[in-house]
Structure formats: C-alpha cells, structure tokens
C-alpha cells in the first residue's frame, strides 16, 4: 500500500476517517443544527468579533480558490472522470476534521496585548496539550506549526496570485523572464500591473484586520458561489443529453479495476490529493478565522464550519460534471483552468470568459483571506516584528510569486503544506478525546433544551 499511496494521502485521509468515527458521524447527525446556527446570526456583542456566517465565509473564501476549479480539471485529465468522486469523498471526510480544528481553535483562543482576540493551531497545540499534561510537546508542535505555516501561506497565496496573472495575460508564461530580459511587451505589462494592483489592494484590506477581511468575504463569497452554481446549471442544461451518462461515468470510473489494482489506486490517490488540498482540512488554517467568531459555544462554531468542505465538495462535483458532460476533458492542447473555461464555453463562446472572471474572483478571495492567515503566522513566529512590515511583506511576496514559475510555486507549496499538517494532526489525535467529550456534552445540552 505504501508503495502506491503517497504519505500525504494516508496522513490526511486517515485523520478524516478517524475523526468521522470518533465523533460518531457528526457531519451527518448534527448537520441540520449547523444550518440553524448559521441562520441565527451573531450571538455575542463583543466589538472584536465577527458573526458566525462571516467567519464561515472568511474560511470558505480561503478554500474555494482555483484548487476546486483547476484542481478538478487536472484530476480528470490525469486520472479520468472517476477522480471526481474521490475528490468529493475525501472532501466530505474533511468535514469532521475542520469542525474539530475550528472548535478547539475557538475554545483556546486568547486576547493579545492589544486587546484583540486571536487564535489558531498554535494556541490549541500549546495550551490544549498543556491541559492534558504535555506542555513541552505542545510548545514544540505549536512553534513547528507556526514556522511551516508561515512559509506554506506564501505558496498557497502565491499560487492563486500566479493563476490570476496567468488568466489576465491569457498565457502561462513567466512574466518575470520578460522583466529580466527587458522585454516589456503587452503580456508582461498586463501581468505586472495585475500583480501590483492586487498586492496594493490586499495590503489595504489587511490593514483593516479580520473585520475588514471578513466583511469583504461575507459580501463577495455568497454571490460568487451563487453565480458559479447558476453558470454550472446553464452548462448542464445545454449538455443535458449527456449529463446522466457523465454521472454514470464518474461512478463507474471511480471503481474501475480494468487497469489492475495499481490503476484503481492511482485514480483514488489523484482524486484524494486534489480533494484534500482543495478543502484544506488538517492544515489548521480555518481555526484562525473561526476563533474570531462571536459564537458563544466553541462546539457551535465547529458545527458551522461543517458547511465549508461541503461547499467546496459541491463545487468540485459540479465542475467535474460540467467538464465531462461537455466533453472538455477530451480536448487537446489545454490544461487546468482552461479545461473549465472550455466546458463553460459549450454554452456560448462568451460564456467561457464569464467562467474566467469567476475563476479570478475565486482566486482573489483566497489571496485576501490568506493575507490575514499570513499575519497571524508571522506574528506568532516573530512576535516583535512590526505589524505594518508584516502586511507590506505579504503584498511584496504575492507580487513576486504572481510573476514566478507556477511549477516552482507548486513544489514549494507541496513541501510546506505537508509539513504544517504534521504537528497539527498530531495535536488533533492527542486532543481527540477532549474534542469528542466536548461534542458529546453539547449533544446532551441540545437534547435537554428540546
């Protein structure tokens, strides 16, 4: 098995399965309660908090990036339609992981020297493990998570920025090479201007803190999500004659052993990798936004976050269905997000450009929320570093990554994204007893209140 399946899949997939069973299928039994909590709105009047819905949208804005659009197309082009189902399955397995992360992130949040609420993996690793008698291990894991996460955010945000620049220029060429050679043609100029404009706007929003980031996400994410769903429905309507066949192909291909066991595992691995990366379960970033929620009970903020991986999984499935039913995955000479664009172009040529605009919006919201995550990682690892310097450095970083080589960014991101999950998931295993007890207590309270 280890010869076929990469460590990252076993590492992230196992914690998803473990917590799903450990929490007694919380993602199903308490899902209706999660929806009710979202509709309830803000539950605390503290001026430094944001509503549960805003916290969810901030988390979703970081995860629903190009990973759920380009990632689906990449998985299909490499492993076939069956990869879509495995993307969704592993995305759903991430629901309990994210609920657990956000619950303990909210539970162990702190008020910093400036009187502002702050939280994230660093705090539940340090303080949570201290509470169960493992203070030294907790301190080591918290610092490791902070350092690895600091660099991982560079890659995560940098990849999104890079794809925005690529979509804006219409090419995936290295704009930086044009600058180095002094060749400032139209593509290079557009790339530089796009990277600079977005970097400057991100710094402006970041200076406003989580309230400004959250407000931005709460305004744009719901409409962005709704527009994508509407566009996908149009694609499926135009290709309605092949939709049923596409669904059958997804399910049949997911369990196809005609290429042997190795071929089957390859489909699972590719789908799982893209699904796990797309929903970011186990990476410990969602608790940073969730810890600022006004929700009084930490368990309830965890439940609200169940909707995050579900929204990502639904987009991945719809996107895959659009690609397969339109036949875009069989086109030659295109890859990644351009396959998604081709699927939407099956409605009309101009409809493909609307898909491109939506893809840019998805990527942009990810860059926005990652900016807040970056600030928290930097502040934890380098607490004496000037806050303004941190914010400006993020803008400079995404500008540089925006005009760099995509392959270099992906290699960089894969390494540090994996490294940051190691201390975080070790902490989740060790704190799983605490998490399970907290949710059992919540279930008893909920039952008594009814």
Image (spheres, helix red, strand yellow):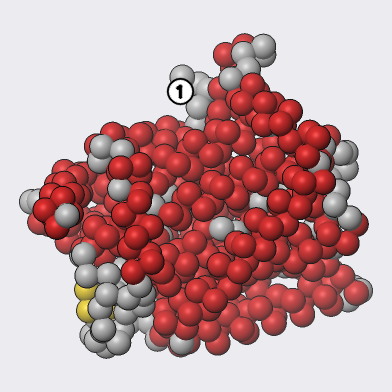
Q: Is residue 52 visible?
A: yes
Q: Position of residue 81 (x, y in %)?
A: 68, 31
- Horizontal and vertical percent position of residue 418: 45, 47
On the image, the x and y values in percent for residue 348 come to: 89, 55
Q: Provide the residue designation for mark 1.
A: 2
The image shows a total of numbered marks equal to 1
Residue 143 in percent (x, y) is at 29, 61
Residue 270 in sight = no
To which quarter of the image does residue 328 belong?
top right
Q: Residues within 10 Å of mark 1 (few under 14, many from 20)?
A: few
What's the residue at 69%, 58% (across, down)? 230
Question: Dividing the picture into quarters, in which one does residue 248 lie?
Answer: top right
The residue depicted at 11 percent of the width and 53 percent of the height is 448
Query: What is the secondary structure assignment of the residue under circle 1?
Result: loop
* Residue nearest the observer in this picture, 82 or 424: 82
- Horizontal side of 307 relative to 110 (left or right) equals right
Picture residue at 61% right of the left edge, 46% below the top: 316
Is 273 placed left or right of 344 in the picture? left
Quadrant (top left/top right/bottom left/bottom right) for the C terminus: bottom left
Of 26 and 370, nearer the camera is 26
Nearest to the observer: residue 244 or residue 19: 244
């Amino acid at each position: 098995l280890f010869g076929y399946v990469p460590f990252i899949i076993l590492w992230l997939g196992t914690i998803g399965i473990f917590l799903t069973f450990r929490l007694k299928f919380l993602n199903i039994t308490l899902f209706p309660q999660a929806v009710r909590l979202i509709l309830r709105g803000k539950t605390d009047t503290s001026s430094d908090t944001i509503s549960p819905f805003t916290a969810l949208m901030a988390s979703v804005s970081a995860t629903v990036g190009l990973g759920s659009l380009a990632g689906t197309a990449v998985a299909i082009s490499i492993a076939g339609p069956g990869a879509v189902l495995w993307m969704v399955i592993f995305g759903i397995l991430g629901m309990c992981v994210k609920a657990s992360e956000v619950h303990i992130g909210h539970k162990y949040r702190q008020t910093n020297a400036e009187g502002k609420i702050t939280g994230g993996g660093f705090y539940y690793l340090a303080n949570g493990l201290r509470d169960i008698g493992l203070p030294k291990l907790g301190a080591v894991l918290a610092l490791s998570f902070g350092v690895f996460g600091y660099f991982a955010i560079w890659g995560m945000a940098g990849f999104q920025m890079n794809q925005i620049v690529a979509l804006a220029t219409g090419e995936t060429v290295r704009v930086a090479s044009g600058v180095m050679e002094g060749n400032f043609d139209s593509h290079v100029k557009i790339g530089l201007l796009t990277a600079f404009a977005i970097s400057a706007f991100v710094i402006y929003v970041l200076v406003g803190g989580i309230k400004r980031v959250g407000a931005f996400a709460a305004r744009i994410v719901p409409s962005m999500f709704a527009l994508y769903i509407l566009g996908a429905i149009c694609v499926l309507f135009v290709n309605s004659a092949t939709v049923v066949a596409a669904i059958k192909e997804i399910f049949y291909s997911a369990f196809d052993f005609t290429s042997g066991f190795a071929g089957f595992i390859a489909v699972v691995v590719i789908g799982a990798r893209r699904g796990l990366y797309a929903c970011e379960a186990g990476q410990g970033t969602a608790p940073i936004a969730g810890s600022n929620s006004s929700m009084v009970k930490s368990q309830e903020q965890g439940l609200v976050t169940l909707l995050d991986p579900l929204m990502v999984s639904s987009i991945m499935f719809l996107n895959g269905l659009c690609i397969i039913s339109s036949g875009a995955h069989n086109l030659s000479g295109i890859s990644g997000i351009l396959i998604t664009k081709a699927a939407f172009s099956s409605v009309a040529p101009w409809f493909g450009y609307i898909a491109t605009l939506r893809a840019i919006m998805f990527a942009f919201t990810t860059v926005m929320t990652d900016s807040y995550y970056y600030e928290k990682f930097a502040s934890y690892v380098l607490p004496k570093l000037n806050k303004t310097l941190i914010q400006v450095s993020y803008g400079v970083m995404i500008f540089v990554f925006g005009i760099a080589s995509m392959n270099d960014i992906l290699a960089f991101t894969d390494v540090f994204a994996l490294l940051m999950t190691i201390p975080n998931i070790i902490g989740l295993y060790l704190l799983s007893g605490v998490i399970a007890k907290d949710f059992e207590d919540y279930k008893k309270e909920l039952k008594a209140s009814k």
